Image (cartoon, rainbow, N blue to C red):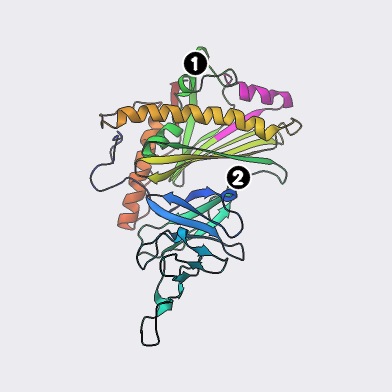
Amino acid sequence: MSDTPRSTPQGSDDGLLRGFWYPALRSDQVRGASMHTAMLLGIPLVVGRDARRDAFALRDSCPHRGMPLSFGQFDGQTLECSYHGWKFEPTSGQCRAVPSLTARDKLKVDRVFAQNFSCEEQDGYFWVYVPETEQRAETPPPAPRLPTFGQKYRITRLEAELPCHVDHGIIGLMDPAHGPFVHQAWWWRTRRSIQEKEKVFEPIPNGFRIRAHSPSANSAFYKLLGVYGQPITTRIEFVLPNMRFEEIHCGPKWFSSRTTVTPIMPQRCRIDFCAAWNVFQWTPFMVPLFNIFARAFIGQDRRTMERQAVGLKYDPPLMLVDDADRPAKWYFQLKAAHLESRRSGQPMQHPIEGPTTLQWRS
């Protein structure tokens, strides 16, 4: 894969990574024995919880005639297709009943399955594991978790859809230079605050991170943490397929966030932002206040990607520059190395050999 991104995937390759967990939808969207539809990597899903509160995700399609299972009835034990009444156990997808069969029929009902996906609830999301191929059985690792550093904290979740391929959402997510132009606000930074920066990046499994460092002095958010009178450090990581983690520590106070760019369809994705913290706990209505600012911040990214999509639909040639675009180049190299490892069966060759210092202005 070239270091220079294409505006659209070429050939039959949709550019989406499989063999990973993705957040399908938020937990609060499913109540009781209800079900909810979701779309991941172009796969229609029906998601819910069974009577034991175990999460499930099935392809939203009856294997009989393709009727969406989400139109059917679910009693907590079995999911019944609305077309012919076929019933399926939700966590395994195994068929339990075909009402039209007679004693003469030889169909072994228990050998019929609706396609099911590994599904776990974590951090207020239904996470779904999308295997490499639909025919390949995989035992996935545990679903990702947001790092937290204590028992008492507040948590929030926000999202915004983007009209672009996940690649563009991800390299926008890790782009260090757009802040003064896209996120202009009194509580963040302005063009007048642009300054030269230098950070040390180092490889980690399936990704890279910026070493823990003192945060930018031109951000009002970090300045607010000065009220605690202790040194402030921040660390940022990117991990395949789509996750950016940030940790801020100020003595015993901390803020932790995870932002994922979730592929919905080849040309549509979604920012899923989850944050937890124990800072400013004395502030009234802290979560609503945080959400106001975070929605504004994410909304600025969404509007930018909507505008970029106008240009990308004409498939223009694109370019990446050093050093500000080096993280984007690393993303494409990591993606290519991962795919080659899966193809060859050999260990992944990490494209970053060791600590690397990058400089840019933002």
Q: Quadrant of residue 274?
A: top right
x, y percent for residue 158: 56, 38
x, y percent for residue 175: 44, 29
Residue 120 visible from this viewpoint = yes
Q: Label 2, label 1: how many angstroms apart (C-alpha)?
A: 31 Å
x, y percent for residue 4: 29, 33
Q: Residue at x 58, y 17 (%)?
A: 186
Q: Which residue is mark 1?
A: 194
Quadrant holding the N terminus? top left
In the depicted view, which residue is nearer to us: 346 or 271?
271
Q: Magenta residues, as a range?
A: 217-235
User: In this rendering, is residue 141 above or below 322?
Assistant: below
Question: What amino acid is labelled 1 in the image?
Answer: Ile
x, y percent for residue 282: 76, 32
Question: What amino acid is labelled 2 in the image?
Answer: Pro
Numbered tag placed on residue 147 in the rendering: 2
